[in-house]
Amino acid sequence: MDKIGMTTPIVEMDGDETARLMWGLVREELVRPFVDLKTEYYDLSLTARKETEDAVTMDAARAVKRLGVGVKCATITPNAQRKAEYDLPRLYPSPNGTLRSALDGTIFRSPILLPGATPLVPTWTRPITVARHGYGDVYKGVEVSARGGETVRLTGAGEDKTVFAFQGPGVALAMHNTDASIFSFARSSFACALDRKQDLWFSCKDTISQTYDGRFRDVFQKVYDEEYKAAFEAAGIRYLYTLIDDAVARCMRSNGGFVWALKNYDGDVMSDMIGAAFGALALMTSVLISPDGRFVYEAAHGTVTRHWRRRQAGERTSTDPMAILFAWSGALRKRGELDGLPALSAFAQKLEDAAMDTVRDGVVTGDIAALLGRGQVADTEDFVAAIRRRLG
């Protein structure tokens, strides 16, 4: 069988631990036998980041800007324990955070719907995609501890306001955002909804945070009115702004099938809730989209350290590679769309269908078996091999 050709490379970003092992399995067993795979490879493992003093992460980000499509494995964001384990000179930042900042991107996370899996919310028949603003808010917050008798003040733009006059010990937090980042978030969200032909919701709490959240509300409305309204109407989709508490209530009674744009912290929380309600946090797709049309597909889970320790002891584990498979299929599909290669996009769909057929036929990993309440539990290698047989 002739392999499917490619013209432009995909930026491949390798990772750590069990995720790295599954990454290689999916690439070598499920992609390379069928695609004349072209990638520009960057090793984002903690070891390689140490060797390059983390320069490799920015190199990968620049490659995505140049080539347009990347696919990323799960990586370690080190804490104090990891710093000691890897003898790191410092705590390197999250590679995902570095990529988000470099690309000015928004994270879109959607559940992978398995055959036979019933969402915990019975009305949800279609996936809900969460667009999380990956900048600012509490993640860039400045915190102080206050003693009794101290007053915390906020100064800026010619204003000087009292945050709180502490009579006893307490804490204070200041957050920020920028118009440039909010505009990029809005444009990426509208573009994603238009690409998927789905309604876009945006929600925050502007009744309480009239200046901070109000700026998000106003920017989204301006971008919609001036840049996307005509296209949305032509596509038969709509934009909805509502308060976040109302949006949560609407979401719980909806059928799904929409893109939900949320500020950084809100998106962090709600994407995990939606992922768990649809099946499992590990069964989520994740794509970082920049406002200028760059894409990074990744597995929305960690490096599965617990299973890695067992692997180091010589065991085989039944770790689920489905999110990594969907990261590869997403990147291949987008590369095919951008380069005018329908056969490559069609293979991406075939790869996803083969994975779903494997689950439908009852060959599953341990967590999928627990989710479905049935199935023949296979270890990771055997599960990938079962998918490979269905690809022909």
Image: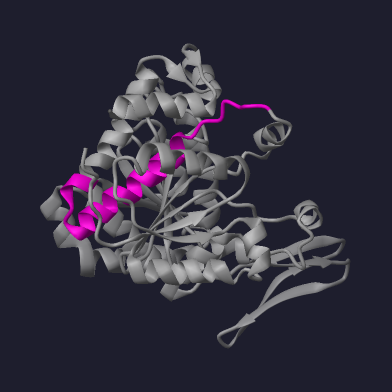
Residue 359 spot, x, y in % from top left: 39, 21
- Picture quadrant of residue 317: top right
Considering depth in this image, is 154 or 58 the residue closer to the camera?
58
Q: Say if 48 sits above or below 319 in the image.
A: below
The structure residue drawn at horizontal position 21% and vertical position 37%, both measured from the top left corner, is 1
230 displayed left or right of 153: left
260 displayed left or right of 135: left
Q: Say if 319 sits above or below 6 in the image.
A: above
- Picture quadrant of residue 224: bottom left
Residue, far front: 1
Question: Which portion, as a residue range, is magenta?
Answer: 315-344
Q: Is residue 325 magenta?
A: yes
Considering depth in this image, is 8 or 267 the residue closer to the camera?
8
Residue 64 spot, x, y in % from top left: 40, 66
The structure residue drawn at horizontal position 88% and vertical position 67%, both measured from the top left corner, is 147
Q: Is residue 299 magenta?
A: no
Whether residue 126 is visible to the viewer of this picture, yes or no, is no
Residue 289 spot, x, y in % from top left: 37, 59
Whether residue 259 is visible to the viewer of this picture, yes or no, is yes
Q: Say if 278 sits above or below 293 in the image.
A: above
Quadrant the C terminus occupies: top left
Residue, far left: 234
The structure residue drawn at horizontal position 60% and vertical position 40%, both measured from the top left corner, is 18
The structure residue drawn at horizontal position 62% and vertical position 27%, both measured from the top left corner, is 316
Figure label count: 0
Considering depth in this image, is 257 or 75 the residue closer to the camera?
75
Residue 279 spot, x, y in % from top left: 47, 28
| Main SS class of the magenta portion in the image | helix
Q: Say if 322 sits above or below 259 in the image.
A: above
